[in-house]
Amino acid sequence: MKKKYRVKKFVLYKPLLIGGLVYIILLAVFGYITNGLFGILLPIVSALFGILIVVLLSLFNSYTIDNDVLIIKLWYGKTKIDIADIKKIKETYPKYYIDIRYEKYKQTTVCLKDKDEFINDLKSINPEIEIIPYEKKCKSK
């Protein structure tokens, strides 16, 4: 069985993109006031380049279950985890993220569009996986 899971894209990138656009506008206005036309061009190009890098890096992530192995491909490399070695899955905030604890002390975090389906498929292969639901922590006074 080989199944690929969709990555939840731009969960935290939306604030970054909005902040980048505000940054571009503020720097363009300030640059125009201080340096004229060249003052507008430099901040716009640099900010757009930064936003492009963030978007491109997020496009290369994927999660695949191939028989009894979970394959995590990120922009910087690939990790293979034997599903029999997974001990716990902890749901985190925001709701698309889960922490996978495997072997003795290893842990990785994944961001999925449909995390419930992913968890159910892992549990069908290894029913001994402990699922820890997310609990909102309240500060006591």
Image (cartoon, rainbow, N blue to C red):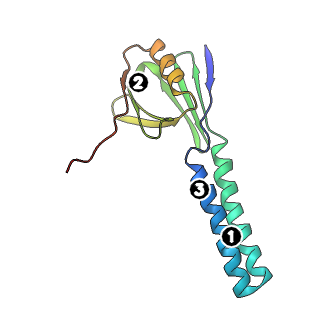
Going 74% across and 67% down the picture, which residue do you hit? 45
Identify which residue, 116 or 54, lies in the foreground: 116
Q: Position of residue 24 (x, y in %)?
A: 68, 68
Left of 33 or right of it: where is 6? left
Left of 92 or right of it: where is 76? right
Q: Which residue is mark 2?
A: 86
The label nearer to you, 2 versus 3, is: 3
For the residue labelled by badge 3, is the local secondary structure a helix, a strand or a loop?
Answer: helix
Residue 7's quadrant in the figure? top right
Q: Crowdedness of circle 2 by 10 Å Cα count: few (<14), some, many (20+)? A: many
**Residue kind at label 2, given as amino acid type:** Ile
Q: Which residue is mark 3?
A: 16
Q: Is residue 125 above or below residue 111?
A: above
**Residue kind at label 3, given as amino acid type:** Leu
Identify which residue, 89 or 16, lies in the foreground: 16
Q: Which residue is mark 1?
A: 25
Q: CA distance from mark 2 to mark 1?
A: 47 Å
Q: Are marks 2 and 1 in contact (CB under 8 Å)?
A: no
**Residue kind at label 1, given as amino acid type:** Ile
The label nearer to you, 2 versus 1, is: 1
Q: Position of residue 109 (x, y in %)?
A: 47, 37
